[in-house]
Image (tube, grey):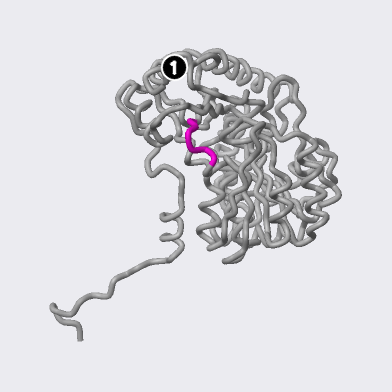
Amino acid sequence: METAATPRPRITGSTAVERIISSSRRPKTLGAGNPGAISLAMGEPDSGTPTGIVEAAVNALTSGRTRYAPMAGSPELQHALATYTTAKYGRPTMSEEIVLTHGGSGGLAATMLALVNPGDRILIPEPTYSLYADHAAMIGAEVIWVPNLADGSLDLDTLQEQAADALMIILCNPGNPTGRVYPDSDLHRLEQLLQDNPNLLLLADEAYADITFDGGAFTSALTLTGARDQVICCSTFSKTYAMTGWRLGHVVAPAELASSINTIHRTLNGPLSTFIQDAALTALQIPDTDLQAAALSYQQRRDIVVEFLTGLPGVEMLTPQGAFYAFPRITSSLTSDEMAARFAEAGVLVRSGSEFGPSGEGHIRISFATDVDNLKEGLARFAATVKELT
């Protein structure tokens, strides 16, 4: 019998929590700043969800589409996405190859939990989105950081050296935080790498596939037909359709892998919202011209960023080719974390480059997804602070 003097056992919790906390590069708090601070930190479109999508959701709600959806997701939406993928990328795709997910992050997590075991080696070209490494830590996999080359392209020689002992490569394209779009030649060398290593998987995060600039071509991993059975592609409605808060994404994978991913996803999340999936059907009908207009709007804001930062002493930057991020390197005695704190004190919120991998140290990530007036004022504060730092 327990007495008052008997010490109670300590609840230690899962070691996954300890692994994530000890290795995560993601900020503990995000968005905090002094009153009046301008945020160039968040990767969220400023435009709001298009009216037609919102109306479709409202109509679904008022017509009673509020009950549980099938555990695997809406068959209509799976079919629509399969048709969309076939038409857009020339990859014949069936509904059973589509996994509907709780945002892109839910798709990434479910994919890794379904396919990666503790101790597996994961190759992550970087700088890149920091969530991938957290997912690897959650599982207990080993992350091998592979810094990109100075021009932003993949270090394919190092990837090839590491490939034989690795299970997966995780590629963010177009890139967060750099805004780089990997050239077609990089993707096709990756295809050959996969063919040479039949046990290696490629998980491609293509959240920004519809946001590219200057007429540049984007090569989706879904076009790598020579390694089709080894390619998993994760996407989201968040960026293309400004549906960040709706939390809807999808994974395209060979049917056997898709079944495994779906098993994990439905176990973690249960069914997705019925009316949100209904609204997504409307999103897929938005004309390409509207999507191109949105991309042009980001390109114009990209140009503002380039204009502000070009010629600033101590600042170097590769021109963003897609997404809505810039990743300048700043010559300073401060770390990226310290610089981000100084910018926050000056009234502009940005992200520390070290969040995005070892080679991000010395960099700052700027999001130009905000409106033009805020962007210009935020950049003015940024530039004034850079002059103090350098």
Which of the 4 quarters of the picture holds residue 162?
A: bottom right
**Which residue is at a point 46% across and 27% down the rendered structure image?**
331
Left or right of 49? Residue 18 is left
Which of the 4 quarters of the picture holds residue 380?
A: top left
- Above or below, comparing residue 59 to residue 298 in the picture: below
**Which residue is at a point 85% across and 46% down the rendered structure image?**
92
Q: How many marks?
A: 1
Q: Is residue 361 magenta?
A: yes
The picture places residue 133, in percent across and down from the top left corner, at 54, 51
The picture places residue 49, in percent across and down from the top left corner, at 57, 28
Crowding near the residue tagged with mark 1, few <14, some 14–19, many ≥20 C-alpha atoms within 10 Å: some
**Which residue is at a point 54% across and 36% down the rendered structure image?**
244
- The answer to which of 311 and 252 lies nearer the viewer is 311
Farthest residue to the left: give it: 4
Q: Which residue is mark 1?
A: 383
The picture places residue 222, in percent across and down from the top left corner, at 78, 44
- Above or below, comparing residue 89 to residue 375 in the picture: below
- Which element type, helix, strand or loop, lies under badge 1? helix
Res. 279 in view:
no
Q: Is residue 156 magenta?
A: no
- The answer to which of 346 and 35 lies nearer the viewer is 346
Farthest residue to the bottom: give it: 1
Q: Which residues are magenta?
A: 359-364
The picture places residue 241, in percent across and down from the top left corner, at 62, 31
Left or right of 159? Residue 34 is left
Q: Amino acid at mark 1?
A: Ala
Res. 4 in view:
yes
Q: Where, quadrant-wise, is the N terminus in this rendering?
A: bottom left
Q: Where, quadrant-wise, is the C terminus in this rendering?
A: top left
- The answer to which of 237 and 27 lies nearer the viewer is 27
- Above or below, comparing residue 179 to residue 278 in the picture: above
